[in-house]
């Protein structure tokens, strides 16, 4: 007797037996019960989710001797013939081998005849996306005005290949992937009906490996039972399907926690030698990283939501405290991003080994507690000479992790750095006792790292320490004659008041940094002009004037409404009170006007007349 696969033996024969797809089943069952049938249906979705199965059940429900009804009886002659594939009025057509326009014309000729045995003539076209464009065009008129008692059902896995004119003439139903829990329940039901013993971990492993496809899950179950016999175990399932065992994952995470690169490399070699399915291994790795991250964050309260067995829960609960939450989060993200690249790489084993080594060395590659929040927070590149002013050669600059303006530091009498924070700027103080060593300190010692944005005019150099006992650049020292020959007292420049022995930094002129500062202020719930509005304006910024160029008239109107907020943010940022100018955008001009204006320029007259040339295209920049 011929052996039937589990997928064929347990193929659903009623809507109620189909796993998942509740919406599609409800709509088609009601259409059959009320005898309100559309001319054409389009069933799309990934492989093995029940498209052809539901099409057959719908054909039986329409032609059942007890119709109209919500379900076929599967006992009458009509239902049995459709199940056996011998019904004269129900035709299943393979779109891949019957895809020419001649096949479509032959189909149109048979449509005109009335049903011979059943109530409806049903044409089920599987893999319908394989039909040629001419074949689709030949069916257009038939689908729009079909004869009575004729129903078309198209099944496809690639609906994007369908002409929109065909889709618009059909009722379109999208079949979804089945969830892991739904597949698990379906497989358990099949095993119970077969009278076989099984381990929950093995069934869940097959459900996870099937990736939402019922037919794939049944094929994998058949494959595992072929070796395991009357019992389904997790070890046998992993061996048959070429999947990594739980012990390998436990060893891998032990090596990742200890940053043990030799062990990680050895495990990578074992994975390649055992012929493990690398694509599914990376999927499982991402799932385990998610499990560890959630357990690290929420503890045992997360266990009911993870679907783990008792042994798995104990294993992951013991491993979770070995990692920091940022490490797990970054590793999870890296694994998800690398998944497709590893599978499609010409050397997937080498790509997997590189990923695992990166996961092990992740805390060393970039300290997680100092990750920059935005690209603007990254340190500026070092000068061309390879060293920073006032910084020993080879020493990297301190990372910038704040959007605040530059912070200057002074030194107390004991030589310790002193940081004074203000609302929009920082002040630095140096006592007279520390003044004689100022220049020496600046050359031999690196001041405390200042958390600030890089300033282009300083080339990301550390903030200078201003000595109030020494002349400040830009000041007129006492006793020095000015340009008019008169002696002037020592006065600070206008932007650096010296009333209390402190100095204020000059205003930062980086518009991108100011936009990022406003974004941070808004994210922390403090008043700020809209960052998206600021980014849509080009800026010309000097300490005395800020000129903004909105890209459109609507942006100009919004900027005028937020003028006060922009000025307030500039003051809080430490930029003082520059004059704010909003330059209206130039009106749009046609290409003909631009060509005429360009042609009338004096410098173009000789060129055009000498070459006897004309201007064909002109674009305003």
Image: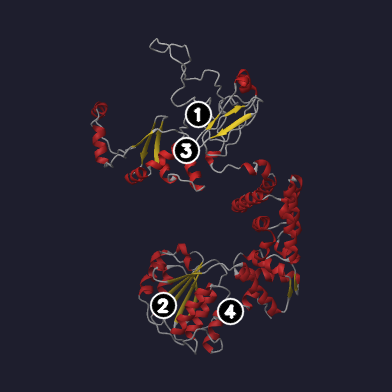
2 or 1: tag closer to the N-terminus? 2
3 or 4: tag closer to the N-terminus? 4
Label 2 packing within 10 angstroms: few (<14), some (14-19), many (20+)? some
User: What residue did someone put label 2 on?
Assistant: 38
Q: Nearer the viewer, mark 2 or mark 4?
A: 4
Q: Are marks 3 and 4 in contact (CB under 8 Å)?
A: no
In this rendering, the answer to whether 447 lies above or below 55 is: above
User: What residue did someone put label 4 on?
Assistant: 17
User: What residue did someone put label 1 on?
Assistant: 505
Secondary-structure class at tag 2: loop
4 or 1: tag closer to the N-terminus? 4
User: What residue did someone put label 3 on?
Assistant: 572
2 or 3: tag closer to the N-terminus? 2
Secondary-structure class at tag 1: loop
Front one among 298 and 6: 298
Q: Residue at x 57, y 39 (%)?
A: 401
């Amino acid at each position: 007797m011929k052996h039937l696969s589990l997928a064929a033996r347990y193929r659903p024969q009623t809507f109620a037996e189909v796993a998942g797809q509740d919406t599609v089943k409800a709509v088609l069952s009601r259409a059959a019960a009320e005898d309100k049938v559309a001319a054409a249906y389009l069933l799309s979705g990934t492989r093995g989710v029940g498209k052809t199965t539901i099409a057959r059940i719908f054909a039986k429900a329409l032609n059942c001797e007890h119709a109209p009804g919500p379900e076929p009886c599967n006992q009458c002659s009509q239902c049995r013939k459709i199940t056996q594939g011998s019904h004269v009025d129900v035709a299943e057509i393979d779109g891949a081998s019957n895809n020419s326009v001649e096949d479509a014309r032959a189909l149109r000729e048979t449509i005109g005849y009335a049903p011979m045995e059943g109530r409806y003539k049903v044409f089920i076209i599987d893999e319908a996306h394989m039909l040629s464009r001419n074949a689709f065009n030949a069916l257009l008129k038939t689908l729009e005005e079909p004869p009575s008692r004729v129903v078309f059902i198209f099944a496809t896995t690639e609906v994007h290949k369908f002409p929109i004119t065909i889709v618009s003439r059909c009722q379109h139903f999208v079949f979804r992937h089945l969830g892991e829990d739904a597949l698990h329940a379906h497989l358990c039901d099949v095993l119970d009906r077969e009278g076989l013993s099984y381990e929950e971990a093995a069934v869940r492993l097959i459900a996870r490996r099937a990736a939402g496809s019922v037919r794939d899950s049944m094929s994998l179950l058949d494959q595992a039972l072929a070796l395991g016999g009357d019992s389904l175990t997790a070890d046998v399932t992993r061996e048959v399907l070429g999947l990594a065992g739980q012990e390998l994952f436990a060893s891998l995470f032990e090596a990742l926690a200890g940053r043990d690169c030799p062990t990680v490399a050895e495990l990578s070699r074992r994975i390649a030698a055992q012929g493990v399915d690398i694509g599914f291994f990376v999927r499982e790795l991402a799932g385990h990283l998610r499990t560890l991250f959630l357990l690290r964050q929420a503890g045992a309260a997360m266990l009911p939501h993870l679907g783990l067995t008792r042994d798995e829960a104990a294993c992951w609960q013991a491993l979770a405290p070995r990692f920091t939450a940022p490490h797990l989060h970054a590793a999870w993200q890296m694994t998800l991003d690398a998944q497709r690249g590893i599978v499609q790489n010409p050397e997937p084993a080498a790509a997997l080994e590189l990923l695992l080594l990166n996961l092990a060395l992740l805390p060393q590659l970039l300290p997680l507690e100092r990750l920059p929040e935005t690209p603007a927070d990254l340190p500026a590149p070092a000068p061309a000479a390879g060293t920073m002013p006032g910084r020993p050669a080879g020493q990297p600059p301190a990372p910038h992790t704040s959007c605040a303006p530059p912070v200057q530091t002074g030194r107390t009498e004991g030589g310790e750095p002193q940081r004074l924070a203000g609302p929009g700027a920082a002040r630095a103080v140096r006592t007279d006792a520390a003044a004689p060593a100022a220049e020496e300190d600046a050359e031999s010692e690196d001041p405390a790292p200042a958390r600030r944005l890089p300033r282009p005019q300083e080339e990301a150099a550390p903030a200078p320490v201003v000595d109030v006992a020494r002349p400040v650049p830009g000041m007129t020292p006492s006793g020095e004659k000015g340009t008019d020959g008169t002696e002037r007292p020592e006065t600070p420049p206008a932007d650096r008041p010296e009333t209390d022995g402190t100095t204020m930094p000059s205003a930062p002129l980086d518009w991108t940094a100011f936009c990022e500062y406003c974004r941070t202020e808004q994210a922390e719930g403090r008043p700020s002009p809209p960052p998206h509005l600021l980014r849509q304006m080009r800026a010309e910024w000097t300490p005395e004037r800020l000129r903004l160029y909105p890209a459109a008239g609507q942006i100009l109107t919004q900027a005028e409404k937020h003028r006060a907020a922009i000025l307030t943010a500039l003051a809080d940022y430490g930029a003082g009170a520059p004059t704010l100018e909003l330059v209206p955008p130039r009106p749009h001009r046609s290409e003909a006007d631009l060509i005429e204006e360009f042609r009338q320029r004096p410098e173009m007259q000789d060129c055009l007349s000498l070459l006897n040339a004309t201007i064909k295209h002109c674009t305003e920049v």
